């Protein structure tokens, strides 16, 4: 059974990716899980300057979901490129650098910085972070801005370019097409939905940042619909994510049209999930005589 | 190369009991965790297959028994997760991720200068393994332990026989009448510690920790505190469980991996959440 | 403790409303629950012509959520006005008529039809149904179209006018403001999120209609955020809904800024929920010396 | 004016047993439901406080005992909800909404012309209360019941003594060797029913229902079928559980309130889902 797949020029041995922001830079993860079960890992969203992130509380459990308002806490691109990536590279797993910026100039600068690192296999342009004030999600809710941001990165980065989209829009297909026109080789979807929780005892929002991003099984139906829509509307591969906690979940995304899947919240609950999901996909395929993952990508609409 | 120090174990519940009221304890068969766990570390316990509640729940180790291959936790029912756990029965298996957090060992300093533990309420539970290790290594040990009333004091087992345990109850039903911090202050002021400069380790509600910090500052004693925070992962990947750095330093520490034990001067206690 | 509230000119004795589509026209509900616990009831979305609805399967359970693709099955406005409303009116609970259309002309015609019924206390304009091909959600994803639809109804209907919004947009505030400019006296939010599920055994979408509307506790964080945003952006009252299954949930919505709340999916699971929610709100308030519901409307941001 | 005919009852589990394999049955104390329930009605059972799984699960009544105030259900574990139920124990309470659906009574027609029940697999369970009522009212009754093998046949209790029970097993381990529809066809062709025109009531997998329909058409017998569908509410408010109307009629029936028992000619059996 051949699990290999392609993400816009990046070949993966296995379709399971660590979602950005739930794997850090691997330093803690490797103490609890085995990185080699990932086809690739996407690092925590990185900005040019270091960011301290948002005030706590930063997480809140909701029915089958998780709200987070981390706010892109990261040590800045220089430290990531100089220290984090060389360390992570030792595990020989393709590294996807997830980047975030507030302007096209910044996106271009970031892409240029990462282009100089020998350790980056692909860039993932985060035009969908709901937890930062300037930029962030704004790029992902307008087709024009999404196009411009993608183009800016495209000019400074020759390798595989992934654009990560937000579901907080009326028509994802339009944004997806804009990203592809701007030069995206692949699309990641979805980032979190914007949500919040209120503590009825204090009568105040639970999160320090008031709103946060909703992830986990609660959003799986929305994520599947996005993958279904976008994968039929564009010709580049799609990385599907949103609530994947089992091989069954991953298979739903693949059949909806995802060429690879990413696990975010699921990693927080079970560091061994990548192994379980990979093995489960394999067993499913083998029990039905499916010889290659590619046979079932988009099977629900093909 | 297996770099894993944290294990996700299918642990059998050896014993589960209702201590009293909403307080429970259980003993879990988890040799991989028991073998390497340090006092003040914690584990993250999965509640079952449902996605609601979704996240695991963190609990400090109140017992570490490498010889028997078991660990213990003690918990108060405060919400849905802890309620579900109270319904479990001996014999069933639960998924336990650990050991987590930095923990605390008994080092040269403690052995030479002694150790003072200050616990409020259920905060005594995670201090028990530390006390046991201190006694084993023959460090001088004093324990200050307070609760609302005599009936809310947890059994401190053999501790009382092996070292000084100073009890305080708010209603005066046992020991000192008042808060444990009042008792601590009184004993320190009375010179109970002589000239020594023992390390103080404290675990309990935030207002108590804040008060202990003031007292230790006043008496020039080094203080370590054990913190709690809302945790999503418990093993350092999500950056959800942060506490602000102190002393004008920008940014945050993660309670789950940088802590849960911190030097009191490193963190902004006033702004801890959880 | 005074539970009464106002929804754009409509006075309610109690803030708990039956959400459209989960109460039918009351005929079945009254066999299982007590209608008098509702401050008002919103009837199943009604169109001019009868609609047979979408092919089954029409529902699918998801983590803490429900997907539905009913497709506005209804007997048409004439039957609703002639038979259903007169029957329902006997319970003396204010009736909100939820209406759906594919054009402004149709909206205007529908409003005119309902204006002639003596039994309608308010109109709820559904510009957010994800389960019909033409019209439906399209009106709710464009500020201009939402404005036009609202105006069309406003001209034909003098009573309290509620516009029900969809969360499937990038900026709900803009749409909300357009509805208010168009003449809305109150806003209902949220309708369902668009989602889907895939059966990995048949490799096909579970729902007969492929996509459906996601409701239930899973969407509560998104719904709360919408209520929080919109209630601060407009000056008309907001009816909050999305996953309410307890008094605590309802209180979260009220503190987020809702003047009333509606229960949809919760009614499917527990017909006695309106009583439990009302009593729970009352107990919460009484235990804290809150004398009127109005004291806590928007408490989390005021 | 209390119009409520459907009750949400906190029902104590009087008895819960594992019949064999993945088959379970339980007896619930629910006097309000037992008092008015008719054969072929069903109840909607809440799985607990968690929102995952979210919805209640529908089960036909396999026992109705107004005298004892109890009802029975029989179920197969096929997914998470039925698995959770299998873990329940006698003594616990569960929320049960019912009685739901139209159900079926023994009317003059049945008494005069007799009744033929055709069950496949666990489909026998909901037919049991109907059979009991038919016997009580002294209607002539014949039961056709098929399963894969002898070990999968459910115990039909006193039925065998009181009426004709024709068994079929696919592996031939008991009774007729083959499908129950094959047995039905054989008996009808052999004139087993004489000149009567009994009502046929059938419950079981969809392919079986379809086959029974063809047979009844051929022999000019009126047929009632009991359907299943994915249900969200179970009491008629959501319009989720529909089945297409037959005979060129537009639109749908709701299985939960227009059914679950339908005249076979009213519905498009080929397009039933569930
Ligand atoms: C490192 C660490 C060690 C801990 N050790 C123990 C222990 O030994 N014994 C023990 O009884 N408890 C301990 N806790 C607290 C315990 O994790 C929470 O009480 C538990 O997660 C609550 O789960 P629940 O589902 O019952 O409550 P929820 O329904 O989730 O919440 C109920 C209440 O508890 C609060 N709460 C939820 N999660 C946390 C949290 N992580 N920290 C603080 N408050 C929280 C909520 O704000 C709410 O008020 C520890 C927490 C941490 C972070
Ligand atoms: C009116 C009615 C009466 C019923 N009576 C009985 C009974 O007496 N005994 C019994 O064992 N079962 C009965 N069922 C079926 C029973 O409700 C389902 O088996 C149960 O809901 C499955 O729940 P689950 O969580 O275990 O499975 P899920 O995890 O929800 O699903 C497992 C599998 O069952 C299928 N399924 C889920 N819900 C239904 C449904 N409502 N109808 C058909 N298939 C479904 C799914 O498609 C899936 O393949 C009845 C259903 C209806 C509608
Ligand atoms: C704690 C946390 C932090 C996240 N940080 C980032 C980030 O830095 N960059 C990004 O593109 N996505 C980030 N995400 C979004 C995830 O990568 C993923 O798109 C989303 O959570 C949906 O997948 P899931 O349901 O599997 O978590 C974060 C998610 C979580 C839960
Ligand atoms: C089965 C079902 C049918 C619905 N039909 C309608 C409808 O006809 N018109 C409408 O405006 N909303 C309809 N809705 C949306 C609900 O009124 C409500 O806005 C949504 O479900 C969110 O609330 P909840 O989570 O409490 O269900 C329907 C929802 C469900 C679950
Ligand atoms: S809980 Fe995730 S980093 Fe601490
Ligand atoms: S299940 Fe809701 S109408 Fe039948």
Image (spheres, coloured by chain):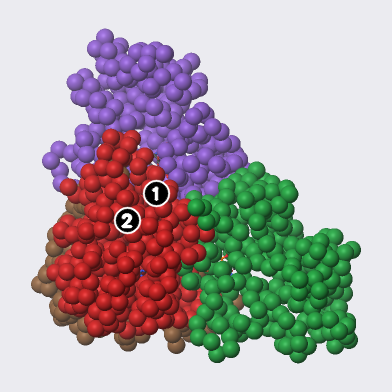
Chain colours: A red, B green, C brown, D purple
Q: Is residue A267 left or right of residue B36?
A: left
Q: Is mark 1 within 8 Å of ligand 3?
A: no
Residue at image location 24% in from the left, 33% down from the top: D264
Q: Position of residue B256 (x, y in %)?
A: 56, 68
Rendering quarter of residue D190: top left
Nearer-the-camera pick, D113 or A111: A111
Q: Position of residue C5 (x, y in %)?
A: 41, 80
Precedes in sequence: disc 1 or disc 2: 2
- Disc 1 crowd, CA 10 A, few/some/many (<14, 14-19, 20+): many
Residue at image location 29% in from the left, 32% down from the top: D206
Residue at image location 20% in from the left, 42% down from the top: D245
Q: Is residue A88 left or right of residue A174?
A: right
Is residue D236 visible in the rendered image? The answer is no
Q: Which residue is mark 2?
A: A261
Question: Ligand 3 is in which quadrant of the figure?
Answer: bottom left
Same subunit, tags 1 and 2: yes
For residue A277, the mark is: 1
The chain containing the residue under callout 2 comes to A
For residue D240, the mark is: none
Residue at image location 17% in from the left, 47% down from the top: A302
Q: Secondary structure at mark 2?
A: strand
- Disc 2 crowd, CA 10 A, few/some/many (<14, 14-19, 20+): many
């Amino acid at each position: 059974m051949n699990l290999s797949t392609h993400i816009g020029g990046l070949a993966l041995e296995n379709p399971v990716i660590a979602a950005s922001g739930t794997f850090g830079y691997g330093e803690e993860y490797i103490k609890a899980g085995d990185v080699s079960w990932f086809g690739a890992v996407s690092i925590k969203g990185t900005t040019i300057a270091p960011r301290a992130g948002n005030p706590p509380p930063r997480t809140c459990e909701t029915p089958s979901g998780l709200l987070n308002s981390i706010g892109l806490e990261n040590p800045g691109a220089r430290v990531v490129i100089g220290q984090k990536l060389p360390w992570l590279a030792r595990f020989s797993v393709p590294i996807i650098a997830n980047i975030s910026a507030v302007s096209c100039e910044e996106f271009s600068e970031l892409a240029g910085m990462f282009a100089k690192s020998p350790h980056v296999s692909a860039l993932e342009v985060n035009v969908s972070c709901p937890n930062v004030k300037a930029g962030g999600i704004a790029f992902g809710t307008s087709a024009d801005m999404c196009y411009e941001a993608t183009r800016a990165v495209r000019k400074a980065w020759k390798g595989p370019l992934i654009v990560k989209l937000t579901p907080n829009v009326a028509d994802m297909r339009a944004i997806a097409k804009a990203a592809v026109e701007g030069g995206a080789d692949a699309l990641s979807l979805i980032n979190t939905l914007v949500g919040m929780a209120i503590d009825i005892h204090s009568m105040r929002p639970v999160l320090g940042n008031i709103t946060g991003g909703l992830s986990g099984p609660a959003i799986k139906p929305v994520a599947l619909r996005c993958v279904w829509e976008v994968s039929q509307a564009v010709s580049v591969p799609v990385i599907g994510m949103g609530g994947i906690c089992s091989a069954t979940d991953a298979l739903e995304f693949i059949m909806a049209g995802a060429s690879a899947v990413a696990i975010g919240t699921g990693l927080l609950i079970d560091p061994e999930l990548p192994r379980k999901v990979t093995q489960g996909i394999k067993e499913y395929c083998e029990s039905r005589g499916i010889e290659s993952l590619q046979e079932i990508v988009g099977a629900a609409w093909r | 190369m297996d770099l894993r120090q944290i294990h996700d174990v299918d642990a059998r519940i050896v014993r589960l009991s209702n201590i009293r009221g909403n307080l429970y304890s259980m003993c879990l068969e988890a040799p991989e965790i028991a073998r390497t766990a340090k006092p003040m570390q914690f584990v993250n316990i999965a509640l079952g297959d449902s996605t609601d509640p979704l996240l695991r729940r963190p609990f400090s180790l109140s017992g570490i028994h490498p010889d028997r291959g078991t660990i213990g936790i003690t918990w108060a029912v405060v919400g849905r997760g802890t309620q579900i756990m109270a319904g479990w029965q001996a014999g069933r298996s639960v998924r336990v991720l650990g050991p987590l957090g930095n923990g605390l060992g008994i080092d040269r300093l403690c052995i030479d200068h002694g150790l003072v533990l200050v616990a409020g309420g259920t905060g005594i539970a995670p201090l028990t393994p530390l006390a046991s290790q201190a006694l084993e290594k023959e460090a001088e040990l004093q324990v200050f332990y307070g609760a609302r009333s005599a009936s809310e004091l947890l059994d401190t087992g053999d501790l009382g026989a092996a070292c000084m345990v100073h009890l305080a109850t708010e209603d005066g039903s046992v020991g000192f009448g008042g808060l444990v911090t009042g008792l601590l202050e009184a004993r320190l002021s009375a010179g109970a510690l002589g000239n020594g400069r023992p390390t103080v380790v404290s675990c309990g509600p935030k207002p108590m920790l804040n008060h202990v910090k003031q007292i230790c500052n006043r008496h020039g004693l080094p203080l370590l505190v054990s913190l709690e925070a809302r945790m999503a992962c418990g093993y350092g990947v999500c950056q959800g469980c942060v506490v602000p750095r102190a002393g004008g330093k920008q940014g945050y520490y993660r309670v789950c991996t940088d802590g849960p034990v911190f030097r009191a001067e490193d963190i902004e206690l006033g702004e801890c959440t959880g």
